[in-house]
Image (cartoon, rainbow, N blue to C red):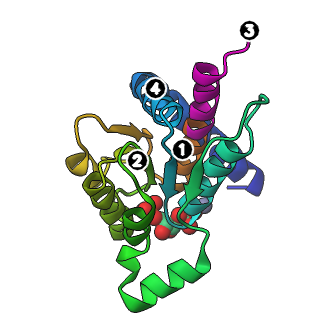
Amino acid sequence: MTIEARLRAHFEASIQAKRDTQETALAALARAAVLLADCLQAGGKVLSCGNGGSAGDAQHFAAELTGRFERERPGMPAIALTVDTSALTAIANDYSFDRVFSKQVEALGRSGDVLLAISTSGRSPNVLQAIEAAHARGMRVVALTGRDGGRIPALLAPEDVELRAAATATARIQEVHILFLHCLCDAIDELLYPVS
Ligand SMILES: O=C(CO)[C@@H](O)[C@H](O)[C@H](O)[C@H](O)COP(=O)(O)O
Ligand SMILES: [Zn+2]
């Protein structure tokens, strides 16, 4: 296969992953947007987490809430649990890497806040523990997953929302996740700050 053919195959696979996800995810996306907008309107905040590329996604989403997405409106409170290297290294060093997010959720999370948990496999222990810690703090969870959801669906409460990418390759799942996050940014803005 030529490089150009490989590149074309990446585009085709990415397009297909989004097409395959579209119909299954729209209702859940709308529910997640309302859950997040209600939380923010009531004075709550969003905590986000994930590993590797999903850590980048967690930061990307928090930055679009605190800064802006596509329209001017007040900043909204969101914290990515992936950015404080002192907290991450201390918790990993003193406890274990599995607790790097859950300890921060225990410290920062309040009832009514929402945890945005991102895992393509649904099997990263630190993300699973963050979900458990969020529930213990009275928080709801929006989980971005892929494949069969891994261990996340069984952990979620009925009022939580799973947004599952209909893809199996990690890269394709992450590409759908970015679309999910931009959809959520747009929907939250439209719900809270509609353009008159
Ligand atoms: O970005 C990528 C692969 O595209 C990697 O950095 C990937 O995020 C890492 O392997 C993560 O540790 C995977 O974690 P998860 O999505 O299974 O929870
Ligand atoms: Zn990647």
Single out the mark in the foreground, 3 or 1.
Answer: 3
Closest to the observer, 177 or 41: 41
In the rendered image, which residue does mark 2 sit on?
Answer: 146
**Residue 164 vertical placement versus 33 (above, below):** below
Q: Earlier in the sequence, mark 3 or mark 2?
A: 2
Q: State the residue at coordinates (40%, 62%).
A: 105
Query: Which mark is first along the chain, 2 or 4?
Result: 4
SS under mark 3: loop
Query: Which residue occupies 41% across, 67% down?
Result: 107
Q: Of callouts 4 and 1, which one flags the residue occurring earlier in the amino acid sequence?
A: 4
**Ligand 2 is located in which of the four quadrants?**
bottom right
Tell me the CA gap for discs 2 and 1: 9 Å
Q: Is residue 20 visible?
A: no
In the picture shown, does residue 27 fall above or below 59?
above
Which amino acid lies under the numbered mark 2 shown in the image of this protein?
A: Gly
- Label 2: few (<14), some or many (≥20) within 10 Å? many
Q: Is residue 172 left or right of residue 75?
A: left
Q: Is mark 2 within 8 Å of ligand 1?
A: yes
Tell me the kind of residue under disc 3.
Answer: Ser
Q: Which residue is at a point 45% across and 40% down the rendered structure image?
A: 165
Instruction: Find the magenta span and give its range.
Output: 181-196
Q: Tag 4's secondary structure?
A: helix
Residue 141 falls in image quadrant: top left
Q: Nearer the viewer, mark 3 or mark 2?
A: 3
- Where is residue 101 shown, x and y percent of the image? 43, 68
What's the distance in space between the residues labelled 3 and 1, CA to CA? 29 Å
Circle 3 sits on which residue?
Answer: 196
**Residue at mark 1:** 177
Q: Please give the residue where the numbered disc 4 appears in the rendered image.
A: 34
2 sits to left or right of 133? right
